[in-house]
Image (cartoon, rainbow, N blue to C red):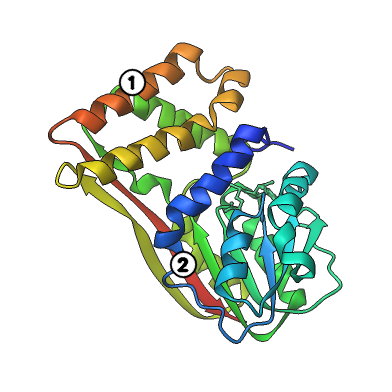
């Protein structure tokens, strides 16, 4: 299993923190009202599942992830939901499910999966007509930062390159509309969300850069193991981001992509 972020406990906690930090950006638009049975692909440790369960109390959710380590943690994190949640350990490219669903949710997972179109086509066998689909994914080429210091940029390029080497796509957000169309889904809508921060809101800027450092660092064990970066270069990335956060002309800009579609 080749995966950018790895499965260590720090990474599992990071996913929970990330879920809380980004929820105000992700959930205002998503609407699963009227749905009863949701399939979540790449559910990880259940950071998004927790939100979905809270927001739509009538939903039952089936969590699919190919990592037993993630699912074991998800079982603990979602114990409060009892039999509203089912866990299935499967590769999303080879789904074999027993149920039909009326909702599909994918967040920060398709970016890691080679053959994303195959995943989307497969889900159709398990979706009822009229199902609602909401996806949220990265668009890493949208990252703009000022000053664009070289060590953080070098690290960012290596981080994205590493994901590509695993068959992932750090710009998959930009392709979501095409993928949904090619897979035969309907009523496709594309939205953007994210951050445009500067020193006019210094606290938000600091918080975002703090979050960003932790996100980028989650790729460090893999980058070091692959020999793509040295420990000094990881530290230099952090120093650059600290410097940017205190620069009077600092700008941080990033956009993710959200899509709605029906089946
Ligand atoms: C970045 S995590 C996101 C988890 C969750 N969606 C969230 O937002 O917290 C991506 C998850 O996708 C899972 N994953 C990656 N490739 C997969 C595949 N081919 N099939 C199923 N799950 C996969 C990983 O194990 C990981 O838990």
Q: Quadrant of the N terminus?
A: top right
Q: Is residue 204 visible?
A: yes
Residue located at (38% from left, 46% from top): 141
- Mark 2 or mark 1, which is nearer the start of the sequence? 2
- Category of crowding for the residue at label 1, using alpha-carbon neighbours closer than 10 angstroms: few (below 14), some (14–19), many (at least 20): some
Ligand 1 neighbours mark 2 (CB distance < 8 Å): no
Q: Is residue 169 visible?
A: no
Residue located at (74% from left, 58% from top): 79
Q: Secondary structure at mark 2?
A: loop
Residue located at (31% from left, 23% from top): 240
Residue 150: where, in percent of width, then height?
Answer: 30, 23
Q: Nearer the viewer, residue 53 or 114?
A: 53
Q: Which residue is mark 2?
A: 27
Q: Secondary structure at mark 1?
A: helix
Quadrant of the image occupied by residue 151: top left
Residue 250: where, in percent of width, then height?
Answer: 19, 36
Q: Quadrant of the C terminus?
A: bottom right
Quadrant of the image occupied by residue 40: bottom right
Q: Is residue 240 left or right of residue 170?
A: left
| Vertical comparison of 99 with 43: above or below | below
């Amino acid at each position: 299993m080749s995966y950018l972020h790895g499965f260590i406990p720090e990474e599992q906690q990071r996913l929970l923190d990330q879920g809380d930090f980004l929820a105000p950006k992700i959930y205002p638009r998503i609407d699963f009202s009227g749905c009863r049975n949701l399939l979540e692909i790449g559910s990880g440790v259940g950071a998004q599942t927790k939100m979905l369960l809270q927001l739509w109390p009538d939903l039952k959710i089936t969590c699919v992830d190919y990592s037993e380590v993630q699912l074991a943690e998800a079982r603990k994190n979602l114990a409060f939901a009892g039999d509203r949640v089912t866990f299935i350990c499967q590769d999303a490219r080879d789904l074999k499910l027993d149920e039909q669903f009326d909702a599909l949710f994918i967040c920060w997972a398709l970016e890691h999966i080679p053959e994303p179109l195959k995943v989307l086509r497969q889900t159709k066998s398990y979706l009822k007509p009229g199902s609602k689909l909401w996806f949220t994914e990265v668009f890493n080429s949208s990252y703009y930062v000022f000053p664009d210091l070289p060590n953080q940029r070098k690290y960012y390029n290596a981080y994205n390159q590493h994901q590509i080497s695993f068959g992932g796509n750090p710009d998959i957000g930009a392709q979501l509309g095409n993928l949904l169309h090619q897979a035969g889904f309907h009523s496709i809508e594309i939205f953007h969300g994210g951050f445009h921060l500067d020193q006019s809101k210094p606290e938000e800027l600091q918080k975002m850069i703090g979050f960003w450092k932790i996100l980028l660092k989650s790729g460090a064990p893999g980058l070091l193991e692959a020999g793509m970066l040295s420990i000094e270069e990881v530290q230099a990335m952090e120093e650059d981001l600290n410097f940017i956060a205190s620069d009077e002309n600092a700008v941080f800009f990033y956009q993710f992509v959200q899509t709605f579609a029906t089946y």
